Image: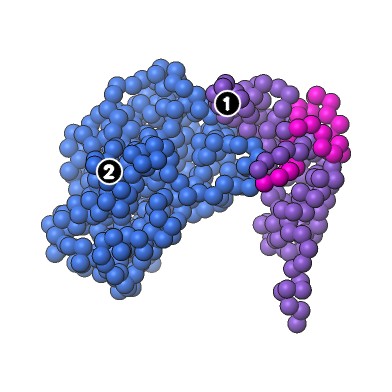
Chain colours: A purple, B blue
C-alpha cells in the first residue's frame, strides 16, 4: 500500500491556483466525474464527492450576482465595491468590479475577469478582479495587468 | 409515529442579566453566572444540581471547560458545538437528547458577553475567509448586504420595508423595560441613517451590547417538581447550506427551509399554529428571509408581509416581542434571547408586551452569515 506521505505531494489547491494566476492564467478545478467547475479550490468536488479534479482555463466571463458598497470613510480611502460574480462556468466568487463608481455596479451586468497582483504583509498575492464587459477588457491572459 | 423528542424535555427556568451595558466591569463569565443564578432560582435549583452544560462563547476557545471551571461544576455531559449565534437554539435539542438518554438530569444552557464594555464592537472568533480577504468585505455585514441586495433585485423588496422591521422591533422594545434602545424611531429615520454596506444602514444592523442568558431544562417527567409552568420543547432542528456567503446556493433562501420543515414535523404543527415568534434579527433582512423560509409567507413576499405594522405591537403576527437584536440586545451571539422571550410569552409573564393566549412559540437562531439555521418549537402543557 502506498503511504499517504508519498501520495499527497506537490503544491496544494490554494498554491496551485496562485501559481496559475502568477502565470496569467485564470484556471478553476473541473471535476472529471460530474464535469462541474468548482470554486474555491479544494481536494474534492463538493457536488459529487469526486477526487479527480483538473485545472482548466476559464473564459473570465461573468455576471454580477450581487453587489454592495463598503462605505469606508473618505480619509481612509473612500467607499469601495464588493461583489459576488457568477462565472460563466458556474461557480461564484467574491471580487470587486473596477472602472466604475462603486455604487453604480449593478446586479446582472456582464463582467470580464482580470488578474491583478497586490502586496500585503504576507507578500505578493495574485487576485481576480472584474471590469464591465463593455469596457473592452482583453480578458484573463494579461499577466499582472493592473494593480488592485 | 410521534418523534420521541417531542415534549420529552421542558424548560423550567430562564434568566438574563447585563443587557445593554453590564455594570462594574463584569466579564463574560460574570454575566453568564448572573444569568444562571436567575434561571436556577426560578427552577428552585442550585448550581450543584447542574450536571449538563451547554454553552458557547466569543471569549473562550473552550467555552464548556471555562464555564464549568468558573461555575465550580463537573458536568457529566457537555456540548459546545459552535455554529455562531444559532448555537444556543441548537443546544435545546442536544440538551433534550442528553436528558432523554439519561446522560444528565439538569441541563443548563447559558451564555454571557461583555463585548460592549470590553471590546466596544462585535467580539468574534470567526476566522477570515481566504477567498474573501483580498476584497475586504466588512464581516459580517457585507455578506448580509449582498443577500439583501439580491432579495431586492429578485423580488422588489424595498429599503422602506427593511426599515419597517427595525421600527417594529423598536416599538416592541418600548414595551420591554430591559430593552437597551427605547427612543422613538421611524422609517424615515432608518432610511436617513448612516450607510454601512449598501443597502444596509447602521439602523438595519443589530445593536452591540453586553448581555447574558440562561435556560434550565429537565426531563418532562419531573416538571411537577418546579414552580414555573413548564414550557416543552416540541420540536427542533438545525440546517446548513454554506459557511461563507459566496457558497450560499441562493442568496434569497436560507437553510431555515430545512430546519423549519423538520422542526414542524417533529412538533406536529405548522406555521398557522404559531402564536409568537423570536427570529434572530442580526440585520433587518433576517426576519424577512425567515418569515418566508419558515412558511409564514411565500418566497419574495416577506418585504410586503412586514409592512404596515404586521409584526409590530398590535399587528397580526407578534415577532421579536422583546425588541430583538435590533433594539433589545445583541451581545454578539443573540440565539439564547429569542428562546427566553418565547418562554416568557408562553408562561404569560411578558407584562405590557404579552401576547394573549400564546400556547405555541417558535424560536429561530441564525449563525455565521445566514450559514446556520436552527428552529425550535416550544409549547405549553396544553399543547402536549
Q: Relative to residue B134, is residue B38 drawn left or right?
A: left
Find out whether residue B180 is within the magenta segment.
no
Residue at numbered disc 1: A76
Which numbered marker is on residue B25?
2
Which numbered marker is on residue B296?
none
Q: Is residue A126 above or below residue B192?
A: below
Pick the quarter of the image with the C terminus of chain B. Answer: bottom left
Q: Give the residues in magenta.
A: A122-147
Q: Relative to residue A144, is residue B250 drawn left or right?
A: left
The residue sitting at 22% across, 51% down in the picture is: B34
The residue sitting at 67% across, 21% down in the picture is: A101
Q: Disc 1 on helix, strand or loop? A: helix
- On the same chain, marks 1 and 2? The answer is no
Q: Relative to residue B47, is residue B281 drawn left or right?
A: right
Q: Is residue B358 above or below residue B173?
A: below
Measured as percent of width and height from the top left, residue A86 is found at 70, 39
Q: What subunit carries mark 2?
A: B
- Occupied quadrant, residue B1: bottom left
Measured as percent of width and height from the top left, residue B205 is found at 43, 32
Q: What subunit carries mark 1?
A: A
Find out whether residue A146 is within the magenta segment.
yes
- Occupied quadrant, residue B177: top left
Q: Relative to residue B195, is residue A128 drawn left or right?
A: right
10 Å neighbourhood of mark 1: few (<14), some, or many (≥20)?
few
Task: Look at the image and tell me whether residue B132 can be seen.
Answer: yes
- Occupied quadrant, residue B382: bottom left
- Total marks in image: 2
Amino acid at each position: 500500500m502506498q503511504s499517504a506521505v508519498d501520495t499527497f505531494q506537490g503544491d496544494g489547491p490554494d498554491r496551485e491556483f496562485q501559481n496559475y494566476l502568477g502565470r496569467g492564467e485564470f484556471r478553476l478545478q473541473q471535476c472529471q466525474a460530474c464535469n462541474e467547475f468548482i470554486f474555491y479550490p479544494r481536494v474534492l468536488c463538493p457536488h459529487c464527492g469526486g477526487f479527480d479534479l483538473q485545472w482548466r482555463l476559464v473564459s473570465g466571463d461573468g455576471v454580477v450576482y450581487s453587489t454592495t458598497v463598503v462605505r469606508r470613510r473618505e480619509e481612509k480611502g473612500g467607499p469601495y465595491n464588493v461583489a459576488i460574480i457568477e462565472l460563466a462556468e458556474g461557480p461564484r466568487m467574491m471580487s470587486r468590479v473596477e472602472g466604475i463608481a462603486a455604487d453604480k455596479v449593478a446586479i446582472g451586468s456582464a463582467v470580464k475577469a482580470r488578474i491583478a497582483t497586490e502586496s500585503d504583509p504576507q507578500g505578493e498575492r495574485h487576485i481576480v478582479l472584474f471590469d464591465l464587459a463593455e469596457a473592452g477588457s482583453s480578458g484573463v491572459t494579461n499577466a499582472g495587468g493592473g494593480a488592485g | 409515529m410521534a418523534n420521541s423528542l417531542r415534549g420529552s424535555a421542558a424548560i423550567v427556568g430562564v434568566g438574563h442579566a447585563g443587557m445593554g451595558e453590564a455594570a462594574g466591569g463584569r466579564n463574560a463569565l460574570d454575566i453568564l453566572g448572573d444569568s444562571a443564578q436567575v434561571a436556577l432560582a426560578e427552577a428552585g435549583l442550585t448550581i450543584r444540581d447542574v450536571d449538563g452544560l451547554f454553552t458557547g462563547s466569543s471569549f473562550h476557545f473552550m467555552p464548556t471547560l471555562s464555564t464549568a471551571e468558573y461555575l465550580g461544576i463537573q458536568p457529566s455531559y457537555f456540548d459546545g458545538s459552535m455554529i455562531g449565534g444559532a448555537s444556543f437554539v441548537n443546544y435545546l435539542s442536544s440538551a433534550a437528547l442528553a436528558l432523554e438518554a439519561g446522560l444528565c438530569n439538569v441541563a443548563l444552557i447559558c451564555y454571557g458577553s461583555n463585548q460592549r464594555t470590553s471590546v466596544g464592537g462585535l467580539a468574534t472568533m470567526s476566522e477570515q475567509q481566504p477567498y474573501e480577504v483580498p476584497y475586504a468585505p466588512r464581516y459580517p455585514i457585507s455578506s448580509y448586504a449582498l443577500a439583501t441586495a439580491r432579495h431586492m433585485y429578485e423580488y422588489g423588496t424595498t429599503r422602506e420595508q427593511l426599515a419597517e422591521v427595525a421600527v417594529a422591533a423598536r416599538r416592541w422594545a418600548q414595551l420591554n423595560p430591559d430593552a437597551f434602545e427605547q427612543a422613538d424611531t421611524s422609517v424615515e429615520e432608518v432610511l436617513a441613517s448612516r450607510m454601512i454596506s449598501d443597502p444596509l444602514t447602521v439602523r438595519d444592523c443589530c445593536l452591540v451590547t453586553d448581555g447574558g442568558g440562561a435556560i434550565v431544562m429537565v426531563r418532562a417527567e419531573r416538571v411537577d417538581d418546579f414552580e414555573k409552568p413548564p414550557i416543552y420543547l416540541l420540536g427542533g432542528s438545525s440546517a446548513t447550506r454554506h459557511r461563507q456567503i459566496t457558497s450560499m446556493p441562493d442568496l434569497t433562501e436560507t437553510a431555515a427551509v430545512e430546519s423549519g420543515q423538520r422542526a414542524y414535523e417533529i412538533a406536529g404543527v405548522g406555521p398557522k399554529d404559531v402564536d409568537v415568534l423570536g427570529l434572530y434579527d442580526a440585520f433587518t433582512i433576517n426576519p424577512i428571509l425567515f418569515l418566508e423560509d419558515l412558511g409564514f409567507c411565500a418566497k419574495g413576499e416577506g418585504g410586503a408581509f412586514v409592512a404596515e405594522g404586521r409584526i409590530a405591537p398590535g399587528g397580526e403576527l407578534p415577532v421579536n416581542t422583546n425588541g430583538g437584536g435590533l433594539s433589545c440586545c445583541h451581545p454578539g451571539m443573540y440565539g439564547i434571547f429569542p428562546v427566553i422571550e418565547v418562554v416568557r410569552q408562553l408562561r404569560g409573564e411578558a407584562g405590557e408586551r404579552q401576547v394573549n393566549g400564546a400556547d405555541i412559540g417558535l424560536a429561530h437562531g441564525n449563525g455565521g452569515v445566514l450559514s446556520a439555521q436552527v428552529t425550535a418549537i416550544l409549547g405549553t402543557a396544553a399543547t402536549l
